[in-house]
């Protein structure tokens, strides 16, 4: 349920392999809006990280990025991700897979499986109670003032269940 930029700028120093936690940097429009959100590393994500490490050329051994650009001093660019996604057509819509499509699929799956709304919003790195969204009877400013729990353990269970769903065989 990550934005593509969150994955692209993933660094090895942000990964606690033993506890399977990725302290993801959630970039926003200004440096003051940036924050970190711990995300559980599910089996599919662990496989991708391990595979990226094993495929990394020796010349890039010092790069901090899990998905480095060719020269290693930056992360892979958005264009490279888009080109990769275009290689895998799908049926429906315009025949393309999109990163936002993964996020919207996560949201739809979460709603259909009655997952905790706040945990789902957190996993999507949304500001809960932000903007014009209002929970019935709750002032958004009050929600933000008191809402301090990142719901990591609830999100971890959701992430594991969703990973199982997306990696299961289609019947």
Image (cartoon, rainbow, N blue to C red):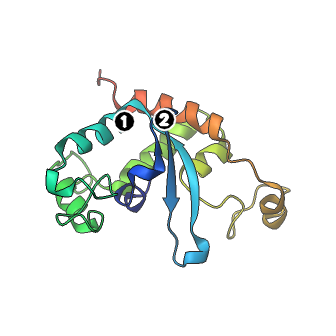
161 to the left or right of 75: right
In this view, 50 is above or below 78: above
Q: Residues within 10 Å of mark 1 (few under 14, many from 20)?
A: some
Marks 2 and 1, how far apart in space?
8 Å
The numbered mark, 2 or 1, whose residue comes first in the sequence reads: 2
Residue 157: image location, x then y, percent: 57, 30
Q: Are marks 2 and 1 in contact (CB under 8 Å)?
A: yes
Looking at the image, residue 163 sits to the left or right of residue 129; the answer is left
Give the total of numbered labels: 2
Give the residue drawn at x 57%, y 53%.
37
| Of the pair 123 and 30, the residue shown nearer to us | 30
Q: Residue at x 81, y 67 (%)?
A: 141
Q: Give the x, y percent position of residue 7.
A: 38, 54
Q: Which residue is mark 1?
A: 46
Q: Is residue 79 above or below residue 160?
A: below
| Numbered disc 1: secondary structure | helix
75 sits left or right of 119 in the view: left
Observer-nearest of 45 and 14 = 14
Given residues 142 and 49, the one toward you in this image is 49
* Vertical side of 21 occupied by 23: above or below: below
Residue in view at x 47 percent, y 51 percent: 14
Q: Which residue is mark 2?
A: 20
Q: Which mark is residue 97?
A: none
Q: Position of residue 106 (x, y in %)?
A: 46, 43
């Amino acid at each position: 349920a990550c934005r593509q930029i969150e994955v692209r700028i993933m660094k090895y120093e942000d990964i606690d392999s033993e506890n399977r936690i990725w302290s993801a940097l959630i970039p926003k429009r200004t440096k003051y809006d940036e924050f970190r959100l711990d995300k559980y590393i599910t089996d599919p994500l662990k496989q991708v990280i391990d595979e990226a490490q094993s495929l990394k050329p020796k010349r890039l051994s010092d790069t901090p990025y899990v998905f480095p650009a060719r020269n290693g001093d930056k992360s892979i660019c958005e264009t490279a991700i888009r080109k990769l996604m275009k290689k895998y057509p799908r049926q429906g819509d315009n025949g393309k897979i999109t990163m936002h499509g993964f996020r919207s699929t996560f949201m739809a799956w979460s709603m259909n499986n009655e997952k905790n709304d706040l945990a789902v919003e957190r996993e999507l790195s949304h500001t809960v109670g932000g903007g014009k969204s209002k929970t019935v009877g709750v002032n958004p400013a009050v929600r933000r003032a008191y809402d301090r729990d990142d719901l990591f353990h609830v999100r971890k269970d959701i992430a594991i269940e969703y990973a199982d769903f997306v990696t299961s065989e289609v019947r």
